[in-house]
Image (spheres, helix red, strand yellow):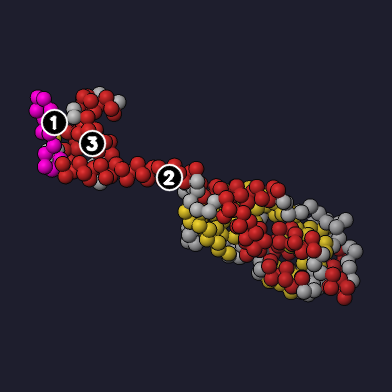
Amino acid sequence: MKTTLDELQAFVAVVDTGSITAASELLDQTVSATSRTLGRLEEKLQTTLLRRTTRRLELTEEGAAFLQRARAILVSVDEAEELMAARRVRPAGRLRVDAATPFMLHVLVPLVESFRAKYPEVELELHSHEGIVDLIEKRSDVAFRIGALKDSSLHARPVGSSRIRVLASPGYLARHGTPTDTQQLAQHVLLGFTQPESLNDWPLRDSSAELLRIQPAISSSSGETLRHMALVGLGIVCLSDFMTRTDRESGALLPLLQDQLLDVRQSIHAVYYRNTALAARITCFVDHVVDTLRERPFD
């Protein structure tokens, strides 16, 4: 598009005020600047829009036709700006959120109802992936990630942290006994992750005073799968508090070795690309998550 909004505004102002002098006052410009802008527009369009006489300006036939289109364009731009301003005040539009299944189920889904009550015009689209996803490839606006961040192209906002604990069901402990020290764990069925291996570092000291790296008897790539196996009594598991708060409160899973447990926490971040503007709908959703977790922490 060769024509600029400034040129359209100058043309419409001249027509509405009836003179270049009056239009320049309206636009807070010099008379010469307004005249040059109008001349530049006519040169780009290769047509005469206004006939200049000593007393007044008259629209040509081409000018009258162009005026109608110019007004429509300026009105559309004003409406678009008003819409964006309204969205900053009242967020609206589709919001694509990505998170690992456990975080989605245990943290995000329970706060959807309260978020929708506050922001009914935001259309939530929730996606779950167990691994780290490319936000652009998956068309996600914001993702929630657990643990250390490695992608420097992402802007990250801290959401909170979640402690990890060693847990087992009352049924499992009734059948196999309750371990009272780290060494006794070797006599039990341990549930762990297939990847990454760092998730099998439990918050306990081994004989070298390092974090205890366990060898799972049963393993899974999904923390939610491990949680369900622990709930039905298949073994001892180490999971993040955000997944097990309800289980711990109900007694379905019992914390073990609490006097030996280290305070190891997983960081939680909301991430989005640096080269994208942070829309109001993203801000209000992340704010809602942060506020909710502040009111009711995981541990």
Which residue sits at x=80%, y=74%? 233
Q: Mark 1 touching mark 2, by CB under 8 A? A: no
Return the x and y of residue 15 as percentages of the image width and height: 20, 34
Look at the image and tell me whether residue 134 can be seen.
no
**Residue corresponding to mark 2:** 84
Please provide the residue range marked out in magenta.
51-63
**Residue corresponding to mark 3:** 12
In-front residue for pair 92/194: 92
Secondary structure, mark 3, is helix
State the mark number for residue 57: 1
Q: Give neighbour class at mark 2: few <14, some 14-19, many 20+ (Cα, 10 Å).
A: some
User: Does the magenta run of residues contain 52?
Assistant: yes
Return the x and y of residue 162 as percentages of the image width and height: 72, 54
**Tag 3: amino acid:** Val
Q: In this view, does 275 lie to the left or right of 79?
A: right
**Quarter in which the C terminus is drawn:** bottom right
Return the x and y of residue 153 as percentages of the image width and height: 52, 50
User: Does the magenta run of residues contain 76?
Assistant: no
Return the x and y of residue 295 as percentages of the image width and height: 70, 48
